[in-house]
Image (cartoon, helix red, strand yellow):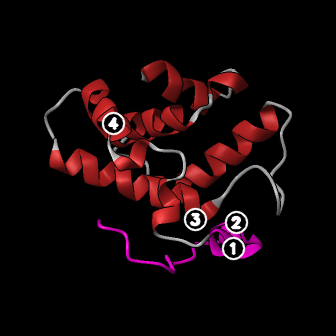
Amino acid sequence: MAAIGRGLLDRTLPKEAWTHAAHFAATFWLLRTRPDMDLPREMPGLIRAYNLALGGTNTDSSGYHETITQASIRAARAMLAEHPSRPLPAICAALMASPFGRSDWLLTYWTRPVLFSVAARREWCAPDIRDLPF
């Protein structure tokens, strides 16, 4: 997990390693090891810079997505709060084994048109199906 988090920070994580699980692994690692960071505020810049460093883009149709990022940070924080003393790999494994581990978990809370809108990519959009449980 540390390698994934550091790879995000220094923009050396291989693109193929930046999976759904890796997003959560980096988030857990940063939440636990970098209490000096305001992750909801700083993660957008980290992901945008990482995308650009690997030759990607951050547009209205690809790259960074604000609503997905902020919802994922909330899910990770909730899981850490439930298991404050468990090792990070165990917490990440528990999350990945839960409904939040599915790559489509957000569609339980947002309709596809809202979640994949330009507005949701650019800024936080509240769920339009049901509230997040955390």
Q: Dot 2, how many residues are within 10 Å of its Cα: few (below 14), some (14-19), or many (20+)?
A: some
Q: Main secondary structure of the magenta part?
A: loop
Q: Amino acid at mark 1?
A: Pro
Q: Are marks 1 and 2 in contact (CB under 8 Å)?
A: yes
Residue behind mark 2: 116
For the residues labelled 4 and 3, the Cα–Cα distance comes to 22 Å
Give the label on residue 67, or none: 3
Q: Amino acid at mark 4?
A: Ala
Q: Which of the two discs, 4 and 3, labels the residue nearer the N terminus? A: 3
Residue 88 x %, y %: 29, 29
Residue behind mark 1: 113
Q: Which residues are magenta?
A: 112-134
Which residue is rendered at x = 38% and y = 58% of the image?
Answer: 74
Element under disc 2: loop
Q: Amino acid at mark 3?
A: Thr
Q: Are marks 1 and 3 in contact (CB under 8 Å)?
A: no
Give the label on residue 83, or none: none
Q: Is residue 104 covered in magenta?
A: no
In the image shown, does 81 or 133 lie closer to the viewer?
Answer: 133
